[in-house]
Amino acid sequence: MMGHRSFLFAGLVAFTSLTALPGCGSGGEAGATASGAASSASSAASSGAGGQGGSGSTATATASASASGTGGGSEVVPTKPADLTHWITGNAADAAVTPTGPGLILMGGGTDVDAAFTWWKPYVNGGDVVILRALGADGYNDYLYSQIGGIDSVETLLVTSVALANSDYVSFVIAHAEGVFLAGGDQSDYIKAWKGTGVETALMKAWSRGAIIGGTSAGCAVLGAFSFAALNDSVYSDEALKDPYNLYMTLDRDFLAFPPLAGYITDTHFAKRDRMGRLVGFLGRIITDAWAPSARGLGIDEATALVVDPAGQGKVLGDGAVYLLEASAAPAVCVAGKPLEYAGLQLHKLTAGATVALPSGITSVPASTLSAAGGVLTPANPY
């Protein structure tokens, strides 16, 4: 098992030395699929996020820049750590505006959903956007600043360590942003470097100010109350169903706490990578391990986004579907070394324009029943 994963991961490393990773990223889930080429100008924003170095239009902020914070008064931007790589496009000074959220963008990886970034513009209110990542470069900068527009600046921060995540500069920039977007990559990097640090605190401060917080692929995978941490690489649906406690089923909690996602776990690249089985396994583990008495999962297709407004109303945008999976009770069998037995799961398939209230999960889209036994799902094709 480890051999084929290590081989695929090594292949990806070799590939990334030549070509930028797409924003959907792989990292800890590199072995999940061989897909990855950017397919449009907007997905070049994601891939540029892995892109080769800075662009000619970027400018670096100076430590002497002052910020007119929404809390009133003028604040001095902390000194940037010498080892922090970052890129700024637009105005390096903090925009003196108040965001009108809070809200969320949950994006499923692959091609970025332009409509989702158009949706956030009135909430961002002409303010500053921060892109958070642990690998890659500045591909989102020109895309969001020039193509989508309506913002004061875009700053990409390459936060690769706990020390950087705890730096005053990184915390300040995130907390003062009107929009923050977590790029794709490896969610294990995010959990290991950002959880319990200033990044976590600053993201929640931005939310409390009314900022829009979003993410794609790995960046979306860490936004829920629970997350698949990918600490031992990716996990496939057949593995999760045959043994929900297998080596690769590394789950995490208590990173971020956005109220609309209370009780939720998110997953991405959903139908394309056949991830329904593992989402069933995630929910079974969450309840069996007594993390929650019930739980819900959101599986988001590539080129698809669920945008969530300040009232908690979510709307599907893009080409694919968002799968809302609800588990109200524990599985009949969820133990190490045995196939998962789980009946009575409720599945809603939401396509473009469909809505759902979060965190209640109330939607007008009817539910179908999904179950797991003997290492397989019923129905076999739940998509």
Image (tube, rainbow, N blue to C red):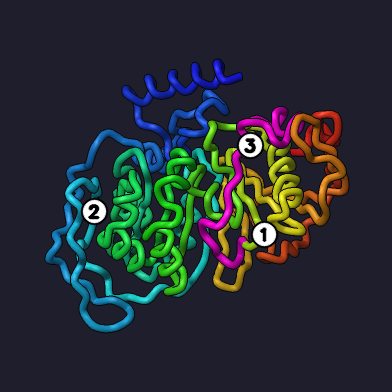
Secondary element at tag 1: loop
Q: Position of residue 15 (x, y in %)?
A: 38, 21
- The three-letter code of the residue at mark 3 reads Met
- The answer to which of 208 and 100 lies nearer the viewer is 208
What's the CA distance linking mark 2 and mark 1?
A: 35 Å
- The label nearer to you, 1 versus 3, is 3
Q: Looking at the image, how many numbered discs can be counted on the residues?
A: 3
- The answer to which of 221 and 247 lies nearer the viewer is 247
The image quadrant of residue 68 is bottom left
Q: Position of residue 232 (x, y in %)?
A: 54, 32
The disc placed on residue 249 is 3
- Residues shaded magenta: 236-261
- The answer to which of 330 and 105 lies nearer the viewer is 330
Q: Which residue is mark 2?
A: 88
Q: Position of residue 116 (x, y in %)?
A: 50, 55
The disc placed on residue 123 is none
Q: Which residue is mark 1?
A: 263
What's the CA distance linking mark 1 and mark 3?
A: 18 Å
- The three-letter code of the residue at mark 1 reads Gly
